[in-house]
Image (cartoon, helix red, strand yellow):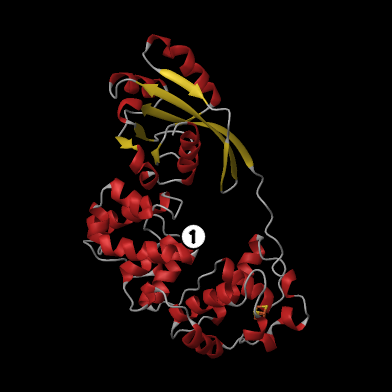
């Protein structure tokens, strides 16, 4: 099929959405926006991006930002590991590259958290390098244009990558990549595609054969993993504060929030607490949460303490965690919790302990 790049770019010039990072090319802004947009919808990214850039306007600010601020700025976007990688990348750029951004696709690939897609987006938008981005939107558009059903296997992915590599132009490769993604996001949508507004209606094989919704075939589902866990809510009732730890093990490792432990660990903890002035209550109610292919069935264990120091350190030590990094007031807690799982656990706590 002959693909008309000019038609695509013309459509993009007339129909692209307003996005704050598109107003002028800025490598730092492009990098941050691309990392934020991985696995998060644009409607959630736009306000977060503006706040992030306002508070951390340069790569130097990002590199020296404290974890609490970074966590706040990332709250609501999910997958906090992306923020940690972004900061690692900023430190690497400053310490190893004298503050100069990588200059090519290959160099961007060396930056933590920067995979083939992100490196291609940055290199094509900021350096006009002719490297194609292939994401879910592009896969859907190409699969329909060419009526390709096998898009998820290794050979199907290679065929799509080869097709896009072939049509990406030497001039405006960054706009081409953004236009393909924009077409997929706004016109060639997963459900209810707007074919009557599509610049490629005449040449689209799926449209011609009246079978648009058959493409692409559904991605084979990964088997879900069921997890049972407890969020340990350590509560100093006297001043209504709660212990936050850095999760150094287990589920959501390296994030900050309530310690997450197994049913066995709670049972073991209960049997060892009798020597301490501490009370523990297990909830019978549950909260459920899904992270990628993990299906979590959660409960809370409330550990009520009478002091904030020794007892708590001892409890956490028994569970393999370090001492709390913070005691947070009830009024501040929802704003400070970075993960939805923690928020659901705390909502369950609040329902029982107003
Ligand atoms: S005609 Fe419809 S199915 Fe084909 S590329 Fe355009 S929006 Fe997608």
- Residue, x 43% and y 54% (percent of image)? 76
- Left or right side of 26 for 35: right
Q: Picture coordinates of residue 229 (x, y %)?
A: 54, 32
- Left or right side of 321 for 97: left
Which residue is labeled 1 in the image?
A: 40
Q: Picture coordinates of residue 141 (x, y %)?
A: 62, 75
Does residue 104 sit above or below 169 in this rendering?
above
> In the rendered image, which quarter is residue 36 located in?
bottom left
Q: Is residue 314 in view? A: yes
> In the rendered image, which quarter is residue 206 located in?
bottom right
- Residue, x 62% and y 65% (percent of image)? 157
* Quarter containing the N terminus: bottom right
Q: Give ligand 1's quarter of the image.
A: bottom right
Q: Picture coordinates of residue 137 (x, y %)?
A: 58, 70
Does residue 169 sit above or below 41 in this rendering?
below
- Residue, x 37% and y 12% (percent of image)? 276
Secondary structure, mark 1, is: loop
Q: Which one is in front, 190 or 173?
A: 190
Q: How many marks?
A: 1
Mark 1 C-beta closer than 8 Å to ligand 1: no
* Quarter containing the C terminus: top left
**Farthest top residue in view:** 275
Q: Picture coordinates of residue 8 (x, y %)?
A: 54, 86
- Left or right side of 213 for 274: left
- Circle 1 residues within 10 Å: few <14, some 14–19, many ≥20: some
Q: Is residue 56 in view? A: no
Does residue 128 sit above or below 323 in this rendering?
below
> In the rendered image, which quarter is residue 296 located in?
top right
């Amino acid at each position: 099929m002959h693909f008309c790049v000019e038609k695509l770019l013309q459509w993009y010039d007339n129909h692209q959405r307003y996005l704050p990072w598109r107003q002028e090319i800025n490598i730092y802004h492009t990098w941050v926006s691309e990392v934020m947009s991985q696995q998060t919808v644009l409607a959630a990214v736009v306000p977060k991006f503006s706040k992030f850039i306002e508070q951390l306007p340069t790569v130097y600010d990002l590199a020296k930002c404290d974890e609490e601020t970074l966590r706040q700025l990332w709250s609501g976007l999910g997958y906090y590991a992306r923020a940690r990688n972004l900061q690692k990348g900023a430190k690497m750029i400053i310490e190893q590259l004298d503050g100069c951004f990588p200059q090519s696709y290959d160099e961007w690939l060396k930056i933590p958290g920067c995979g083939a897609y992100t490196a291609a987006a940055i290199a094509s938008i900021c350096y006009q390098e002719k490297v194609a981005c292939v994401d879910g939107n592009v896969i859907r558009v190409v699969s329909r244009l060419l009526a390709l059903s096998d898009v998820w296997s290794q050979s199907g992915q290679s065929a799509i990558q080869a097709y896009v590599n072939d049509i990406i132009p030497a001039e405006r490769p960054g706009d081409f990549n953004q236009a393909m993604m924009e077409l997929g996001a706004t016109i060639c949508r997963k459900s209810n595609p707007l074919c009557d507004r599509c610049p490629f209606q005449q040449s689209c094989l799926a449209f011609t054969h009246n079978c648009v919704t058959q493409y692409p075939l559904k991605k084979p589902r990964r088997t879900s993993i069921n997890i049972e866990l407890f969020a340990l809510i350590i509560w100093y009732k006297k001043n209504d504060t709660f212990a936050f730890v850095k999760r150094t093990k287990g589920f959501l490792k390296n994030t900050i929030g309530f310690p997450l432990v197994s049913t066995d660990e709670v049972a073991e903890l209960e049997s060892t607490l009798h020597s301490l002035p501490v009370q523990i209550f297990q909830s019978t109610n549950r909260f459920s949460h899904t992270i990628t292919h993990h299906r979590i069935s959660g409960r809370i264990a409330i550990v009520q303490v009478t002091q904030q120091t020794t007892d708590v350190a001892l409890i956490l030590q028994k569970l393999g965690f370090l001492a709390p990094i913070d005691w947070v007031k009830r009024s501040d807690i929802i704003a400070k919790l970075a993960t939805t799982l923690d928020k659901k656990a705390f909502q369950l706590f609040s329902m029982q302990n107003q």
